[in-house]
Amino acid sequence: LRLTMATRVLCAMAASLAVAEAFAPMPSMRTVQGLKLVSPPSALASAVPSKPRLQRQGASRNLLSDLRATLSEGGNVEKRVDYAKVGTWFGATVVEVALLSAAMFAVQTIGGYLPPIGYKCLAILFFASMALKSRIFSILDASRPTMGEVQETKRPSWTPPPIVFPIVWSTIGILRTVSSVVVWEAVGRQMLVLPLIAMMTHLSIGDTWNNINNVERRKGSAVAGVAFVWTSVVTCTYLYWQTIPLAGMILAPSVLWLSIASVLIFNIWKLNGYEPILPYKSD
């Protein structure tokens, strides 16, 4: 029994040495209790890494190096979508629509105590103010970009000169005012009607987009935002047309301008590095 146990122990030791030599990185001589054991040629051959294996190890090291570099630079690996920010934009838009609707209700209530001409002057003043300065009802900073910020951004060669933008937007404001007054007259001088609420929604979405693009300067999210702006103006124009075709035709140029602006925003996004569409917490 003792001889059998000793034999098993010796066999186990021999097997362990063979395995160790088979996985050795380089041919070597091992010393065990003062005895030099030379690895067999077959074991030495198997210990030398093959070319494909070396290639895989090199690729793995490169991948790990790139990953460490990405993490050290605050890359996308550590980023998480900031759903709270998206919720803030959505909530701010809803709040502004509610405030503008409340303002329309106030105008309608006050207009009931005024003579017809007084009510009409109040309605024109309200629509003109909202067409140009609706952002006073926004809970976000919806200010316009400065000239320095405009010049810092890469833009396509066909971008209109900076002087064109205030002229066009002022003209769009006049068209919004006139078309809204035409709708207001067509619906019996009622403020809280679907077409006019659609206009207030369009203005609110535009103010939220101004915050995304001009204040927070998120070029990726601005691409998604301008799609909502464009959709809202098309919807509003359609509702105006359904109410009275003249109002739809007056508002139609704003659809053309926002179509051009949407293409411009998309090209600016491409020229400036394809920023993420969604906001990230690490931004």
Image (tube, rainbow, N blue to C red):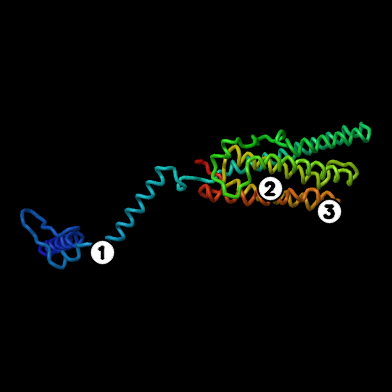
Indicate which label's residue lies in the foreground, 1 or 2.
2
Residue situated furthest left in the rendering: 34
| Kind of residue at disc 1 | Lys
Percent position (x, y) of residue 133?
A: 73, 35
Q: Report the Cα–Cα distance between label 3 and label 2.
A: 20 Å
Residue type beneath disc 3: Gln
Q: How far separated are the C-alphas under marks 3 and 1?
A: 73 Å
Give coordinates of residue 44: x percent, y percent.
15, 64
Q: Which residue is mark 3?
A: 242
Number of marks present in the image shown: 3
- Asked if the residue at tag 2 contacts the one at tag 3, i.e. Cβ–Cβ closer than 8 Å, the answer is no
- 243 or 45, which is in the foreground? 243
Residue 51: image tag: 1
Residue at 79%, 35% (x, y): give it: 103
Mark 1–mark 2 CB contact (< 8 Å): no
Residue 69 located left or right of residue 92: left
Name the residue tied to disc 2. Answer: 229
Secondary structure, mark 3, is helix
Q: Specify few, some or many for label 2: CA neighbours under 10 Å numbering under 14, 14-19, or 20 or more.
A: many
Give coordinates of residue 63: x percent, y percent.
36, 53
Q: Is residue 1 visible?
A: no
